[in-house]
Each structure stands twice: as C-alpha cells, then as structure tokens.
Image (cartoon, grey):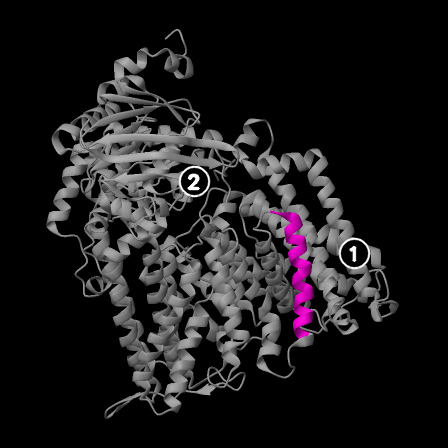
Amino acid sequence: MASALLQTAGLTKRFGRVAALSEVSLRFGAGETVGVIGPNGAGKTTLFDCILGVLQPDAGSVLFQGRRVDRLPVFRRSLLGIGRTFQRLELFSGMTPREHLLVTERARSGRGALWKDALGLGRPTPGEKRQAADLLDLVGLADVADAPVESLSLGRSRLVELARALVGPPKLLLCDEPSSGLDDAERATLVSVLGRLGHERDVAVVVVEHDLDLVGAVVGRLVVLDVGRVIADGPVEAVLADTVVRRAYLGVDR
Amino acid sequence: MSLFLSYLLPGIPYGCAYALMAVGLVLTYRASGVFNLAFGAQAFVSAVIFSIALHDGWPGWAAFVVAVLLASPALGLAMERLLFRYTRAAGPLVKLVPALGLLIAIPAVTQMLVGTATRLPSSLVLQPWKVYFHLASTPVSGEELSTTVITVAVVAAFALVLRSSGLGLRMRAVVESPRMAELSGVRADRTSAAAWVLSSLLAGLAGVLLAPMYSTVASSNFTALLVAAIAAAAIGSFASLPLTLVGAIGLGIAQQLLAGYLPSGTILSSGLRPAFPFVVLAIALVAGRSLRSAEVRDPLASCDPPVHAFRAPARMTEVAVGSRAFTTLAVGMLVATTLVLVPGNWEFVFTLGVVLSIIFLSITLLTGMGGQISLGQAAFAGAGAFTAGQLAMHSVPVLGAILLAGVLAAALGAVVALPALRLGGIAVGLLTLSFALLATNVLFLYPWAGNGATGLTVPRPTLGPISFAGNGAFFWLSLVFLVVLAGAVKLVQWGTTGQELAALRGSERGSAAIGIDVRRLRVVAFTVSAAIAGIGGALYASLQQSVSVNDFNYQFSLVYVVVVAAVGVYSVGGAIEAGVLYAVLMQLTSTLSSRFSSLLALVFAVVALTYVRHSEGVVAYAKAWVLDRAEQLTRHLQAPPLRSAGAPGMPAGSGTARAQDGHPASVRDRADHPEVGAGGVTAGRSESQDLHATPRSHG
C-alpha cells in the first residue's frame, strides 16, 4: 500500500448506548479509490463525519498526510485538502451552481478580505471563472450553471455537490451516497468523473454507496462496515466473495 | 430567615405564571418548530378580555371561559391554520417574522378596539388582596394562592395528558418526526394544531393569572412575562418540561430576592430586575445545550423541499434597463423635490427616512445577506447615538464623533457575536434580544452612557466652514453617508465576504466543508452590521438633536426587523425603501389620536404576516410582479407567434405554483435550456417531495 494519505486509528463514536463506530482503523493511500459499503446504520456517514470533523470521535485519532487533524475544526481540515459531498444535501440555496464553485474557489484560496470587497476588488477573477466553467463542463452542468440550485433535480443537485467538493482540487474526496436520485445519464457522468479522478488528478476517492455495480465500476478496494466495525477490507472481488460479508450485507443468495 | 422567606414566597406565583407560558412555548416549539413570541400578546388579550368582562358585571366563571378557554385557543388555532402550518419546512427567519408581526399587531389591534383607557386587573377565584394565612410569618394573599394552586394543577394535568393519552402519544411522535408520524397514519398537522390550541390556552391562563400582580393591564408587562418564559424554556433546553418548570419558578424567586437584597435606588437594582431574565437567558443559551441540538432531527427531513431562498431573477436586457431608468428617475425626483419643493417638516421626514435606511441597511447585511437573525439592532444604533453624544459633549467634532460611534458599535457587535458563535438560527436572535433588553434597562440609564430618560443632546455637525445645521444641509450629509454605506454593502455583497455570507445562509455545514471559517465570518457580519447601525444611530441623534433611551427601546429592534422583512430584506434597495416608507408613514399617522398611535406598526406587522408566502418582502414581490408582466409584454411584442408558442417555459399552472412559493416563475423561463433534462426532472422531483410534504395550499 502506498504511504497513507489518511489514516484512522481506533476511531470510536457512540450515540448514547449505540456504538456507531468502534475501533475503526483504516488507511487510504494517495490516488486510491475505495468503496465503503454496509447496511444502513453501519456507521458509514459517521465515519465521514469523524474524518471531516463534523462530529468529534469519542476515542481514536485521524491522521491526514501524517499529521493529526482530529482537533481541527471542519474548515481547517477542508483547507488541508479534504472535500466532501453530503448524503443529505447541504447546498447553498439561493445560489447558482456557478456561484457555488466561485465561492468555493475563493474560500479555498483564502484570497478574499473584507477590505478588498469594500474597494470593489472582491469579484471573481477571469481565472476563477474559467476554472468554474471547466468543472461545470466536467460534471455536465453547464446548461444549468446559472439557474438557482433549488430548481435542479435531486440528481443534478448531487452533481453540484460533487463539483463543489472537487474545487481545489482536494487530495481526498469523500462521497456520501453520490448516486442516489441520479438518472442513467447522470450516473454515467458520475462513474466517469469518479473513475478519472484517481488516475488523472491523483485524488483519493472514498465512496459510500449502496449501488454495488457503480462501486465495482469505480473502486479497486472495498471496505465493509457492520454495526460500527470493519468486517472486511480488500480487493473488490475478494470482499464480495467473503461469506461474512455476504451474510451481513448482501444476503446469502446473491 | 423570615426576611429571606418574605422575599422568596412572593416570587413563587410569578414563577408559576412564567412556567405556564414557558410550557406553552416548549410545546409549540417542539411540535411545529416555531418559537411563538406572540404568546406574550395572547396573554395580554386574555387579560384584557377577562378584566373587561368582569367590569361589565359578568360572573367570574363566564369571564374565565370566554377569555381563557375560548379566545386564546381560538387565536392560537387561527395562527396555526392560517400561518404557521406553512412554515414547517422553512428557515428560522420565516418562522420568526410572522410571530414578531403578531407580537406587535395583536396589542395594536386590541388598543384600537378597546381604547387606551386604563384597565384595572381583576382576580380569578379568591379575593386578590385578602390575606388568607401566614407562612413563616409572611402573608399569603388570595392572588398568590390561586395562581400557585392553579398552575400546579394545570401542569400536572398536562403531564398526565402527554404521558398517558392518545393525543399525548401522537404529539410525542410528531415532535420526533412529523413525516414518520404521517406515514404511520397520524395526522401530523392536526396534532400540531392541537399543540397550538393547548399552549395558547396556557398563555391565556398565564395572562389572566398574572394580571392582578401589575397595577394596570398593559401589553409591555406581558412582553416581560414572555421574556421570563423564554429564559425558563432555555433552562430546560427548549425540550424538558420538568426543567422548564423548575427554571421558571426559580426565576420568579430569584427576581424577588434580587429586588429585596440589592441596594435600592440604584440603576443596578431598578434595571437589573427586569433585565434579569435576559441575563439568565443569555447564560442558559451560551452555557447550556445549544438550541441547535434541540432542533428537530427528523430522519425523513430530507423529504422536505429544500429551504427556499429568494433570489432576484435575471431579467431581459430591455426590462432591466427600463427598470433601472425608472428607479433612477424616481430617486432623482425624490431628492430634487426634497430639496426644492417640500415644506420644512417633510424635509425632516425625508432626512429621517435616509437615516433610518442606514440603520435598516445593517439588517440587510446581517439578516438578508448572511441569514443571521438579530433582534438587537436598535441597541447598536443606540450605542452609536450615545457615543456620539458623549463625544460631542467632550467637544469632539460631531462628524468625527459619528464615525467613532460606528467604531464603538462595531466593537460592541463583536462582543455580542462571540457568545453567539455556538448558536444558530433563532437562538442568536434571542441572545441579541437579551442584549437589547440589558442595554435599554441597564446600560443606557447610566449618566456615562445614555443618561436615562433625560438623554443627551447631540448638535448638528460642521465641516470646516460648512455647517449642516439646516435641515436641507443635513439631508445632503445623510444622503452622502447612505450612498457610501449602501455602495459599500453592495460591493461586499458581490465580493468574497458577500458570497461566503450567502453560502452561510444556505448551509452552515456546507460552508464549513468548503473551507469557510464560519465563526470568523459570523463575527465579521455582526461587527460590520453593528458599525452601520451605530453610524445610523449617531446620525439619528444628530438629526433629532436630543435622544434618550426611549428612542432605542428594545421594542424598536423588533419593529425594525418586521419593517425590513415586510418590505424586502434581501436587497440594499429594500432597506432604503423601508426607511423612507417608514418615515413617511410615521409622519402621516402622527396626527392620529393616541388610540390609533400604533397604526403604523400594525401596518408593517400585518404585512409581515405575508412573509410566509413572500419572504422577499411585499415591495420586492410587487416589483417582481411588474417586471414579470413587463417581460411577458416585451417578449410578446418581439417574438413572432410561432416562437413564442415554443418558447421555454412552464404551463401557466405550475408557473403560478412556483410563484406563490415566493419564487418567480420567470427564473425558469430565463434559464434558456429547453431540453427535457432540466424541466422534466425538476417536475419529477417536486412531485416526489410533495408525497411526504405537509398539505400545502395550492391556491
């Protein structure tokens, strides 16, 4: 395995008496694509929340590029290079897809300042506009770039989240059920974008997904969570053949 | 010890009345997500009806039935059916503005209906002032006795209903997840209506019980009751009824103890008592579990349509140019007539409009652009005004004093924002309201600040040889301030900070995930907004030439939000329209008799009720309507019939459906992408949402 881009050690999170994560230790290498599967309630989203800092784990550590990040606030981790999409959409209602990308570029670059705004220097630069347009083309949203994001379908909204998470670009992309609500064409776009990220841009991609066909098309490695524990971790075919996994998640006859 | 008890015991009935109201607040908040500030007004109405009925010779039980069992629940039911059932999926501002509007409108209407004559309060069961027995040598009056007994009985009955009846079970289910409850066959909206009826009944009961403890039935007393109830609810984290009850009674006792033990005759003792609940509220909000954790966590919440945010649609070039030309012309004519034609007092009125526009601009920046609710803007304006006054007294040039006022208000804004960082939505509003109350009841009374009701004098400024003493010259000066500040706010809106604020308004989680330092951004927004309000307040002081604490009463903070929200909170133009409109209407209604003195507030408050439908504000909505028609007309004139038939757009029906959501249909029309993708999929999604959505009116 390549040197770890992100490493969790003994990550544990409890909600009351329910352990959403217990002792989860995982390594993700740079440019690697990993699928995380498991039944609902297995702790997949909680894992993402703990990696990004939306939730504080009760125990364990998160190392990003060899540095402990588990005490950092969300925005600091984001600026270090962790992008994320949300299972429950967290879009900026009232803004267009293009504005989503422009504000993200500005936030990531850290070049904005109140005094610059007040002097009229805060508008997007041509370079930023070009980057935003390129990303919109990449995810196939150019035609709705200037429509308010509330008027988009669920699938296209997810693609806006994906494009927003790709601004930077990040070193690690966490995708939380990116395919739910997508139609076939949108799904194809998603597969091609996720597939190309690892090879072309050296972005590590971790996908939480129920759609095993999509996962199989995109990732090389599969992690299976069940009631907060890692029950399998390895190449896709090997994991899908594992009897424990088949019993916990797939149903024996699949 | 007996001294201690003699202070403590009279606190209990106050605490009981707080508890009744607080339990009602928690109940509606949990059942519908609405923080119903209008309960204060409902308590007032019930007290008025009750005292009028008794004075007209009704028997006590009949007056009680009408005031508490009929009027208040009916009012609550009407509120839920007509307004708040449509706000379930809406953001905190949409839930707050109608409640604020009602808090202002209901006492205003009551005053118009029954006049301003002083009403003496009457008690319910026992002789109010008769001492029935002594407890630890403290006399216990009938009033105190009946309040305590009734509260204990009612709260116990409520606990029983919630625990063991079918209604209680359904209510608890709806609190957890309205969607899930609906899928299990519970009519969630009926259940939440029941919660409104029951909690309104409690509010009415609290009003009737508490009335005899004041010398007259005045609406301000019941706002104070509301404040204490909010603090008690905060102690219970807006969730736990037993904690709320304990908090309320503790608060009532602590207030009386403070009154007894603090050295009398000082500002601290006279001011801290009314401000005390707010101090408690601030501490409970900051130290306790934040409101966010109490916010409804519905597992099916993603079925709700996305929180809608208003966005001014892009317009056709012809229409945009035309509307800009019209605006320029109208503004130019207004300025010209102010300077040339209008009589002196109207010159003053327009200047006041300009100055108010500046104060309102602070709300546009904070609430419209950043989605942060502040109910304390009048306090920031007051801080600016008194800073300018104090500096002018120490012979600082007035113009410099006005600018320094902005600096001090900014510092104050940053200080208030710091404890608000952990909070979101309505909690920030409550915290700023607590600051406003502290300011008007304590801070502004000191001679080094606002100098109490006497106030301060602030001269008109001079700049070298130019004097702004005349109304006309001062108008120009205010206009310069407005243009500079409005321009700066516009630039900020287009720049990084404005875009990041828009992102924060849309989704706080999403903002953090893209690398925005949400806390820093909040502090920046509060600081800049307070600075603008401070400059506006200083200009107001210089315009009036003498100001006192009454000019910046905390109620103005509420009125300001209602006025700006009613006219249009999302645009810089909206602030200016609101300021001028408010000043002009204030002048027009100034000649009315005192009975109708609150007509102005009533007008805006009633308009604020439309906020549920048109969160962009009525003026902005009317403008969009006119521009929509203008676009249709232009398109009709330009396009040959064949093209107009195939033009992208929705069928008329769905177009209006979106427009009534406050979202002009023309947004979609302008998108210029007629492929099936956008339109078709959009329709598909809204259908799937409506499956689970609350019954929404399609009228």
Q: Residue at x 61, y 64 (%)?
A: B223
Q: For residue A127, say whether it is visible.
A: yes
Q: Amino acid type of disc 2?
A: Asp
Measured as percent of width and height from the top left, residue B623 is found at 34, 55
- Helix, strand or loop at mark 1: helix
Residue density around tag 1, few if under 14, some if 14–19, many if 20 or more, within 10 Å: many
Measured as percent of width and height from the top left, residue B358 is found at 35, 70
Measured as percent of width and height from the top left, residue A12 is found at 41, 35
Which quadrant holds residue B99?
bottom right
Q: Nearer the viewer, residue A20 or B321?
A: A20
- Helix, strand or loop at mark 2: loop
Label 2 belongs to which residue?
A58
Label 1 belongs to which residue?
B64
Q: Nearer the viewer, residue B44 or A48?
A: A48
Q: Which residues are magenta?
A: B240-259
**Relative to B547, residue A38 above or below:** above
Measured as percent of width and height from the top left, residue B461 is found at 32, 87
Left/right of residue A11 with respect to residue B150 in the rendered view = left
Main SS of residues in magenta: helix
Which quadrant holds residue B523?
bottom left
**How much space separates mark 2 and mark 1, taking CA atoms?**
54 Å
Residue density around tag 2, few if under 14, some if 14–19, many if 20 or more, within 10 Å: some
Left/right of residue B197 with respect to residue A160 in the rendered view = right
**Relative to B402, residue B642 above or below:** above
